[in-house]
Protein backbone atom coordinates (compact mmCIF):
# COMPACT_ATOMS: atom_id res chain seq x y z
CA UNK A 1 0.00 0.00 0.00
CA UNK A 2 1.06 3.53 -0.70
CA UNK A 3 0.72 4.63 2.88
CA UNK A 4 3.40 2.25 4.00
CA UNK A 5 6.14 3.55 1.77
CA UNK A 6 6.83 6.56 3.96
CA UNK A 7 10.53 7.01 4.56
CA UNK A 8 10.63 9.41 7.47
CA UNK A 9 8.76 7.53 10.13
CA UNK A 10 8.58 3.91 11.04
CA UNK A 11 5.06 2.66 10.88
CA UNK A 12 4.10 0.18 13.53
CA UNK A 13 1.28 -2.04 12.40
CA UNK A 14 -0.97 -2.69 15.38
CA UNK A 15 -4.29 -4.51 15.46
CA UNK A 16 -6.27 -1.38 14.68
CA UNK A 17 -4.23 -0.57 11.61
CA UNK A 18 -4.61 -4.08 10.25
CA UNK A 19 -8.36 -3.77 10.70
CA UNK A 20 -8.39 -0.41 8.95
CA UNK A 21 -6.46 -1.77 6.01
CA UNK A 22 -9.13 -4.43 5.71
CA UNK A 23 -11.92 -1.85 5.92
CA UNK A 24 -10.29 0.18 3.16
CA UNK A 25 -10.26 -2.96 1.05
CA UNK A 26 -13.99 -3.18 1.59
CA UNK A 27 -14.41 -5.62 4.46
CA UNK A 28 -17.39 -4.57 6.43
CA UNK A 29 -16.83 -7.09 9.25
CA UNK A 30 -13.67 -5.25 10.23
CA UNK A 31 -15.55 -2.05 10.75
CA UNK A 32 -17.94 -3.92 13.01
CA UNK A 33 -14.95 -5.07 15.02
CA UNK A 34 -13.60 -1.54 15.33
CA UNK A 35 -17.01 -0.42 16.48
CA UNK A 36 -17.29 -3.14 19.06
CA UNK A 37 -13.88 -2.22 20.38
CA UNK A 38 -14.52 1.51 20.78
CA UNK A 39 -18.26 1.64 21.31
CA UNK A 40 -18.19 1.40 25.09
CA UNK A 41 -15.57 4.05 25.71
CA UNK A 42 -16.89 6.49 23.13
CA UNK A 43 -20.44 6.13 24.39
CA UNK A 44 -19.45 6.57 28.02
CA UNK A 45 -17.30 9.55 27.20
CA UNK A 46 -20.06 11.34 25.29
CA UNK A 47 -22.64 10.25 27.83
CA UNK A 48 -20.73 11.84 30.69
CA UNK A 49 -19.93 14.94 28.66
CA UNK A 50 -23.44 15.75 27.47
CA UNK A 51 -25.36 14.04 30.30
CA UNK A 52 -28.22 12.99 28.09
CA UNK A 53 -28.54 9.43 26.89
CA UNK A 54 -30.41 10.17 23.66
CA UNK A 55 -27.90 12.82 22.63
CA UNK A 56 -25.03 10.52 23.55
CA UNK A 57 -26.45 7.78 21.35
CA UNK A 58 -26.82 10.17 18.43
CA UNK A 59 -23.33 11.57 18.89
CA UNK A 60 -21.83 8.09 19.06
CA UNK A 61 -23.60 7.17 15.84
CA UNK A 62 -22.41 10.36 14.19
CA UNK A 63 -18.92 9.62 15.39
CA UNK A 64 -18.77 6.18 13.78
CA UNK A 65 -20.25 7.43 10.52
CA UNK A 66 -17.75 10.26 10.49
CA UNK A 67 -14.88 7.87 11.21
CA UNK A 68 -15.92 5.70 8.30
CA UNK A 69 -16.24 8.54 5.83
CA UNK A 70 -12.95 10.09 6.94
CA UNK A 71 -11.04 6.83 6.94
CA UNK A 72 -9.48 7.56 3.54
CA UNK A 73 -7.74 10.53 5.12
CA UNK A 74 -6.36 8.58 8.08
CA UNK A 75 -2.60 8.77 8.23
CA UNK A 76 -1.07 5.43 9.19
CA UNK A 77 1.87 7.17 10.86
CA UNK A 78 -0.32 8.02 13.82
CA UNK A 79 -2.05 5.82 16.33
CA UNK A 80 -5.61 5.10 15.27
CA UNK A 81 -7.09 5.54 18.72
CA UNK A 82 -5.64 9.03 19.14
CA UNK A 83 -6.96 10.06 15.74
CA UNK A 84 -10.39 8.64 16.53
CA UNK A 85 -10.60 10.19 19.98
CA UNK A 86 -9.66 13.54 18.51
CA UNK A 87 -12.61 13.34 16.14
CA UNK A 88 -14.86 12.25 18.99
CA UNK A 89 -13.61 15.02 21.24
CA UNK A 90 -14.20 17.69 18.60
CA UNK A 91 -17.68 16.35 17.89
CA UNK A 92 -18.66 16.47 21.55
CA UNK A 93 -17.10 19.86 22.23
CA UNK A 94 -18.87 21.27 19.18
CA UNK A 95 -22.16 19.96 20.47
CA UNK A 96 -21.61 21.39 23.93
CA UNK A 97 -20.65 24.78 22.52
CA UNK A 98 -23.80 24.90 20.44
CA UNK A 99 -26.09 23.73 23.22
CA UNK A 100 -24.76 25.29 26.38
CA UNK A 101 -27.94 25.13 28.36
CA UNK A 102 -26.76 23.85 31.70
CA UNK A 103 -24.13 25.13 34.07
CA UNK A 104 -21.60 22.61 35.21
CA UNK A 105 -20.66 23.29 38.75
CA UNK A 106 -19.93 21.43 41.90
CA UNK A 107 -21.53 24.14 43.98
CA UNK A 108 -24.92 24.92 42.59
CA UNK A 109 -26.45 21.66 41.53
CA UNK A 110 -29.29 20.91 43.87
CA UNK A 111 -30.07 17.46 42.60
CA UNK A 112 -26.47 16.61 43.21
CA UNK A 113 -26.68 17.76 46.82
CA UNK A 114 -29.75 15.67 47.28
CA UNK A 115 -28.01 12.71 45.77
CA UNK A 116 -25.00 13.19 47.98
CA UNK A 117 -27.19 13.23 51.04
CA UNK A 118 -29.01 10.08 50.05
CA UNK A 119 -25.80 8.34 49.19
CA UNK A 120 -24.19 9.20 52.49
CA UNK A 121 -27.06 7.68 54.40
CA UNK A 122 -27.14 4.50 52.38
CA UNK A 123 -23.46 4.01 53.00
CA UNK A 124 -23.83 4.33 56.72
CA UNK A 125 -26.52 1.70 56.78
CA UNK A 126 -24.55 -0.96 55.02
CA UNK A 127 -21.19 -2.02 56.35
CA UNK A 128 -20.11 -4.56 53.74
CA UNK A 129 -16.74 -3.57 52.38
CA UNK A 130 -17.08 -4.51 48.72
CA UNK A 131 -20.47 -2.92 48.56
CA UNK A 132 -19.12 0.19 50.16
CA UNK A 133 -16.40 0.39 47.63
CA UNK A 134 -18.92 0.17 44.80
CA UNK A 135 -20.98 2.87 46.41
CA UNK A 136 -18.00 5.15 46.82
CA UNK A 137 -17.01 4.46 43.26
CA UNK A 138 -20.40 5.29 41.83
CA UNK A 139 -20.53 8.37 44.04
CA UNK A 140 -17.14 9.47 42.79
CA UNK A 141 -18.15 8.99 39.16
CA UNK A 142 -21.37 10.90 39.71
CA UNK A 143 -19.25 13.70 41.05
CA UNK A 144 -17.06 13.55 37.97
CA UNK A 145 -20.14 14.34 35.90
CA UNK A 146 -20.54 17.57 37.82
CA UNK A 147 -17.04 18.89 37.29
CA UNK A 148 -16.62 21.95 35.06
CA UNK A 149 -16.20 20.87 31.44
CA UNK A 150 -12.55 21.85 31.18
CA UNK A 151 -11.68 19.47 34.01
CA UNK A 152 -14.23 16.82 33.22
CA UNK A 153 -13.09 16.28 29.63
CA UNK A 154 -9.54 15.57 30.78
CA UNK A 155 -10.57 13.22 33.56
CA UNK A 156 -12.74 11.32 31.09
CA UNK A 157 -10.03 11.16 28.46
CA UNK A 158 -7.60 9.89 31.07
CA UNK A 159 -9.75 7.29 32.79
CA UNK A 160 -12.60 6.39 30.42
CA UNK A 161 -10.63 6.52 27.18
CA UNK A 162 -7.50 5.38 29.05
CA UNK A 163 -5.13 7.76 27.30
CA UNK A 164 -1.67 8.81 28.40
CA UNK A 165 -0.87 12.45 29.14
CA UNK A 166 0.86 13.01 25.80
CA UNK A 167 -2.04 11.44 23.93
CA UNK A 168 -4.51 13.66 25.76
CA UNK A 169 -2.49 16.69 24.81
CA UNK A 170 -2.61 15.53 21.18
CA UNK A 171 -6.36 14.97 21.30
CA UNK A 172 -7.24 18.26 22.95
CA UNK A 173 -4.44 20.41 21.44
CA UNK A 174 -3.54 21.55 24.94
CA UNK A 175 0.08 21.69 26.12
CA UNK A 176 1.06 18.67 28.17
CA UNK A 177 1.79 20.81 31.25
CA UNK A 178 -1.73 22.21 31.17
CA UNK A 179 -3.15 18.74 30.85
CA UNK A 180 -1.23 17.53 33.89
CA UNK A 181 -2.14 20.58 35.94
CA UNK A 182 -5.81 20.42 35.11
CA UNK A 183 -6.05 16.73 35.87
CA UNK A 184 -4.35 17.37 39.18
CA UNK A 185 -6.74 20.23 39.90
CA UNK A 186 -9.70 18.07 38.93
CA UNK A 187 -8.62 15.31 41.27
CA UNK A 188 -8.16 17.87 43.98
CA UNK A 189 -11.75 19.04 43.50
CA UNK A 190 -13.00 15.48 43.51
CA UNK A 191 -11.04 14.60 46.60
CA UNK A 192 -12.33 17.58 48.50
CA UNK A 193 -15.87 16.74 47.50
CA UNK A 194 -15.51 13.18 48.69
CA UNK A 195 -13.62 14.04 51.84
CA UNK A 196 -16.53 16.22 52.88
CA UNK A 197 -18.38 13.00 53.48
CA UNK A 198 -15.37 11.19 54.85
CA UNK A 199 -15.61 8.49 52.27
CA UNK A 200 -11.95 8.03 51.60
CA UNK A 201 -11.09 7.45 55.23
CA UNK A 202 -12.81 4.16 55.48
CA UNK B 1 12.40 17.23 55.64
CA UNK B 2 9.16 19.14 55.44
CA UNK B 3 5.92 17.48 54.46
CA UNK B 4 5.05 16.67 50.87
CA UNK B 5 2.91 18.82 48.64
CA UNK B 6 -0.27 17.33 47.22
CA UNK B 7 1.15 17.70 43.77
CA UNK B 8 4.28 15.78 44.62
CA UNK B 9 2.25 12.91 46.01
CA UNK B 10 0.21 12.81 42.82
CA UNK B 11 3.36 12.79 40.72
CA UNK B 12 4.71 9.98 42.86
CA UNK B 13 1.58 7.94 42.16
CA UNK B 14 1.77 8.77 38.44
CA UNK B 15 5.43 7.69 38.52
CA UNK B 16 6.33 10.82 36.60
CA UNK B 17 9.27 11.69 38.86
CA UNK B 18 12.82 10.58 38.34
CA UNK B 19 14.34 7.73 40.30
CA UNK B 20 16.07 9.92 42.83
CA UNK B 21 12.98 11.96 43.69
CA UNK B 22 10.93 8.80 43.77
CA UNK B 23 13.23 7.26 46.37
CA UNK B 24 13.23 10.41 48.53
CA UNK B 25 9.46 10.41 48.66
CA UNK B 26 9.33 6.73 49.40
CA UNK B 27 11.64 7.30 52.36
CA UNK B 28 9.60 10.23 53.58
CA UNK B 29 6.40 8.22 53.40
CA UNK B 30 7.90 5.59 55.67
CA UNK B 31 8.77 8.19 58.28
CA UNK B 32 5.87 10.66 58.10
CA UNK B 33 2.51 9.33 59.18
CA UNK B 34 0.60 12.41 58.06
CA UNK B 35 1.87 12.21 54.51
CA UNK B 36 1.33 8.47 54.46
CA UNK B 37 -2.33 8.91 55.31
CA UNK B 38 -2.63 11.45 52.54
CA UNK B 39 -0.85 9.13 50.15
CA UNK B 40 -3.25 6.31 51.00
CA UNK B 41 -6.18 8.56 50.22
CA UNK B 42 -4.71 9.62 46.92
CA UNK B 43 -4.02 6.05 46.03
CA UNK B 44 -7.54 4.99 46.90
CA UNK B 45 -8.98 7.62 44.64
CA UNK B 46 -6.65 6.68 41.82
CA UNK B 47 -7.91 3.11 42.16
CA UNK B 48 -11.51 4.27 42.00
CA UNK B 49 -10.80 6.36 38.94
CA UNK B 50 -8.89 3.64 37.12
CA UNK B 51 -11.92 1.36 37.15
CA UNK B 52 -14.69 3.66 35.99
CA UNK B 53 -18.37 2.91 36.20
CA UNK B 54 -19.25 2.05 32.63
CA UNK B 55 -22.70 2.10 31.19
CA UNK B 56 -23.30 -0.50 28.52
CA UNK B 57 -24.01 1.25 25.21
CA UNK B 58 -27.31 0.24 23.62
CA UNK B 59 -27.04 -2.29 20.79
CA UNK B 60 -28.99 -0.05 18.46
CA UNK B 61 -25.94 2.17 17.94
CA UNK B 62 -24.02 -0.52 16.06
CA UNK B 63 -27.11 -1.56 14.14
CA UNK B 64 -27.90 1.99 13.09
CA UNK B 65 -24.38 2.72 11.92
CA UNK B 66 -24.04 -0.54 9.99
CA UNK B 67 -27.38 0.04 8.31
CA UNK B 68 -26.52 3.58 7.43
CA UNK B 69 -23.13 2.72 6.01
CA UNK B 70 -23.66 -0.61 4.31
CA UNK B 71 -27.34 -1.03 3.62
CA UNK B 72 -28.37 -1.57 0.03
CA UNK B 73 -31.86 -0.32 0.72
CA UNK B 74 -32.32 2.92 -1.18
CA UNK B 75 -33.65 5.85 0.76
CA UNK B 76 -37.24 6.88 0.38
CA UNK B 77 -36.28 9.93 -1.66
CA UNK B 78 -34.45 7.82 -4.23
CA UNK B 79 -37.43 5.45 -4.54
CA UNK B 80 -39.67 8.45 -5.04
CA UNK B 81 -37.36 9.88 -7.68
CA UNK B 82 -37.32 6.55 -9.50
CA UNK B 83 -41.12 6.38 -9.56
CA UNK B 84 -41.44 9.96 -10.79
CA UNK B 85 -38.88 9.41 -13.51
CA UNK B 86 -40.55 6.24 -14.74
CA UNK B 87 -43.92 7.96 -14.69
CA UNK B 88 -42.62 10.85 -16.80
CA UNK B 89 -41.02 8.46 -19.26
CA UNK B 90 -44.13 6.34 -19.47
CA UNK B 91 -46.38 9.33 -20.14
CA UNK B 92 -44.00 10.74 -22.69
CA UNK B 93 -43.84 7.39 -24.40
CA UNK B 94 -47.64 7.19 -24.61
CA UNK B 95 -47.83 10.64 -26.14
CA UNK B 96 -45.04 10.01 -28.57
CA UNK B 97 -46.58 6.72 -29.51
CA UNK B 98 -49.95 8.31 -30.20
CA UNK B 99 -48.33 11.35 -31.77
CA UNK B 100 -49.60 13.99 -29.44
CA UNK B 101 -48.98 16.99 -31.72
CA UNK B 102 -50.78 15.56 -34.67
CA UNK B 103 -53.73 14.28 -32.71
CA UNK B 104 -56.90 15.57 -34.36
CA UNK B 105 -58.57 16.53 -31.08
CA UNK B 106 -55.58 18.59 -30.01
CA UNK B 107 -55.31 20.16 -33.43
CA UNK B 108 -58.97 21.03 -33.41
CA UNK B 109 -58.66 22.46 -29.94
CA UNK B 110 -55.72 24.63 -30.95
CA UNK B 111 -57.54 25.97 -33.97
CA UNK B 112 -60.84 26.72 -32.28
CA UNK B 113 -59.46 28.16 -29.07
CA UNK B 114 -60.58 31.64 -28.21
CA UNK B 115 -59.45 34.04 -25.53
CA UNK B 116 -61.54 32.32 -22.83
CA UNK B 117 -59.66 29.05 -23.29
CA UNK B 118 -56.32 30.68 -23.89
CA UNK B 119 -54.73 29.27 -20.77
CA UNK B 120 -55.66 25.74 -21.82
CA UNK B 121 -54.00 26.29 -25.17
CA UNK B 122 -50.88 27.61 -23.53
CA UNK B 123 -50.72 24.56 -21.26
CA UNK B 124 -51.18 22.29 -24.23
CA UNK B 125 -48.47 24.06 -26.20
CA UNK B 126 -46.22 23.80 -23.17
CA UNK B 127 -46.81 20.09 -22.84
CA UNK B 128 -46.42 19.50 -26.56
CA UNK B 129 -43.15 21.45 -26.52
CA UNK B 130 -41.82 19.20 -23.76
CA UNK B 131 -42.96 16.12 -25.60
CA UNK B 132 -41.48 17.21 -28.89
CA UNK B 133 -38.16 17.83 -27.19
CA UNK B 134 -38.26 14.40 -25.55
CA UNK B 135 -39.13 12.98 -28.92
CA UNK B 136 -36.17 14.77 -30.44
CA UNK B 137 -33.87 13.26 -27.79
CA UNK B 138 -35.13 9.82 -28.61
CA UNK B 139 -34.62 10.53 -32.28
CA UNK B 140 -31.02 11.44 -31.65
CA UNK B 141 -30.53 8.32 -29.52
CA UNK B 142 -32.03 6.25 -32.30
CA UNK B 143 -29.66 7.84 -34.83
CA UNK B 144 -26.77 6.92 -32.54
CA UNK B 145 -28.12 3.42 -32.23
CA UNK B 146 -28.32 3.24 -36.01
CA UNK B 147 -24.75 4.38 -36.41
CA UNK B 148 -23.43 1.94 -33.83
CA UNK B 149 -25.41 -1.17 -34.76
CA UNK B 150 -26.14 -0.25 -38.36
CA UNK B 151 -29.85 -1.12 -38.20
CA UNK B 152 -32.84 1.12 -38.50
CA UNK B 153 -35.76 0.05 -36.35
CA UNK B 154 -37.66 3.33 -36.31
CA UNK B 155 -37.91 5.78 -33.45
CA UNK B 156 -41.15 4.48 -32.02
CA UNK B 157 -39.98 0.90 -31.78
CA UNK B 158 -36.71 2.09 -30.32
CA UNK B 159 -38.54 4.03 -27.62
CA UNK B 160 -40.68 1.01 -26.91
CA UNK B 161 -37.66 -1.26 -26.47
CA UNK B 162 -35.82 1.17 -24.21
CA UNK B 163 -38.84 1.77 -22.04
CA UNK B 164 -39.67 -1.91 -21.71
CA UNK B 165 -36.10 -2.60 -20.59
CA UNK B 166 -36.33 0.28 -18.16
CA UNK B 167 -39.66 -0.78 -16.72
CA UNK B 168 -38.61 -4.41 -16.30
CA UNK B 169 -35.46 -3.39 -14.43
CA UNK B 170 -37.58 -1.09 -12.31
CA UNK B 171 -39.84 -4.01 -11.53
CA UNK B 172 -36.92 -6.18 -10.41
CA UNK B 173 -35.37 -3.40 -8.37
CA UNK B 174 -38.61 -2.72 -6.61
CA UNK B 175 -38.94 -6.41 -5.77
CA UNK B 176 -35.45 -6.45 -4.27
CA UNK B 177 -36.21 -3.29 -2.34
CA UNK B 178 -39.39 -4.80 -1.02
CA UNK B 179 -37.57 -7.92 0.12
CA UNK B 180 -34.85 -5.91 1.85
CA UNK B 181 -37.35 -3.70 3.57
CA UNK B 182 -39.15 -6.77 4.84
CA UNK B 183 -35.89 -8.21 6.18
CA UNK B 184 -35.05 -4.91 7.73
CA UNK B 185 -38.26 -4.77 9.68
Image (cartoon, rainbow, N blue to C red):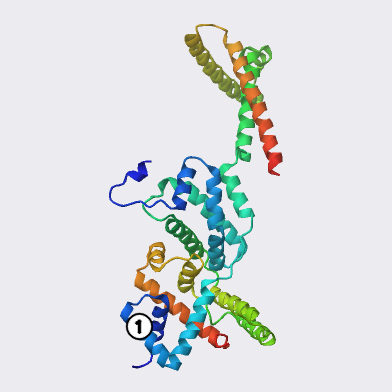
- Residue drawn at x 49%, y 48% as measured from the top left: A68
- Residue drawn at x 50%, y 11% as measured from the top left: B143
Q: Is residue B110 visible?
A: no
Q: Position of residue B117 (x, y in %)?
A: 66, 24
Q: Which chain's residue wears label 1?
A: B
- Residue drawn at x 59%, y 78% as measured from the top left: A139
Q: Is residue B65 above or below residue A40?
A: above
The quarter of the picture where the N terminus of chain B appears is bottom left
Front-most of residues B162 and B133: B162
The residue singled out by tag 1 in the image is: B23
Front-most of residues A165 and A10: A10
- Residue drawn at x 55%, y 69% as measured from the top left: A101
- Dot 1: few (<14), some (14–19), or many (≥20) neighbours within 10 Å? few
Q: Position of residue A40 (x, y in %)?
A: 56, 60
Location of residue A178 by image quarter = bottom left
Location of residue A199 by image quarter = bottom right
Q: Secondary structure at mark 1?
A: helix
Q: Is residue B145 above or below residue B179?
A: above
With A77 as the anchor, is B81 left or right in this view? right
Number of disc labels: 1
With B124 as the anchor, is B9 left or right in this view? left
Q: Position of residue B36 (x, y in %)?
A: 45, 89
The quarter of the picture where the C terminus of chain B appears is top right
Q: Is residue A47 visible?
A: yes
Q: Position of residue B22 (x, y in %)?
A: 35, 81
> Of all residues shown, which one is farthest toward the left?
A8
Amino acid sequence: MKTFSSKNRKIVLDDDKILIEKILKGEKRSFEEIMRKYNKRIFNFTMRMVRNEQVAIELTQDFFIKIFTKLQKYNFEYKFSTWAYRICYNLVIDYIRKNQTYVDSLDDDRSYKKYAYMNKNSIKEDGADAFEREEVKSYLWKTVNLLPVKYKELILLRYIQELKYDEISEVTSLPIGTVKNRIFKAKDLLRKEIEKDGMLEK
Amino acid sequence: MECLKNKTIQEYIDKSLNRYEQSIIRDHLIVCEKCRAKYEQFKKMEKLLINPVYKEPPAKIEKFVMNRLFSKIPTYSSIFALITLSFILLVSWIYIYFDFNNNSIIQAFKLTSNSAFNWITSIITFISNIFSSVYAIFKVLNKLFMIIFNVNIGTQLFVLIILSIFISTLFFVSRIVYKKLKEHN
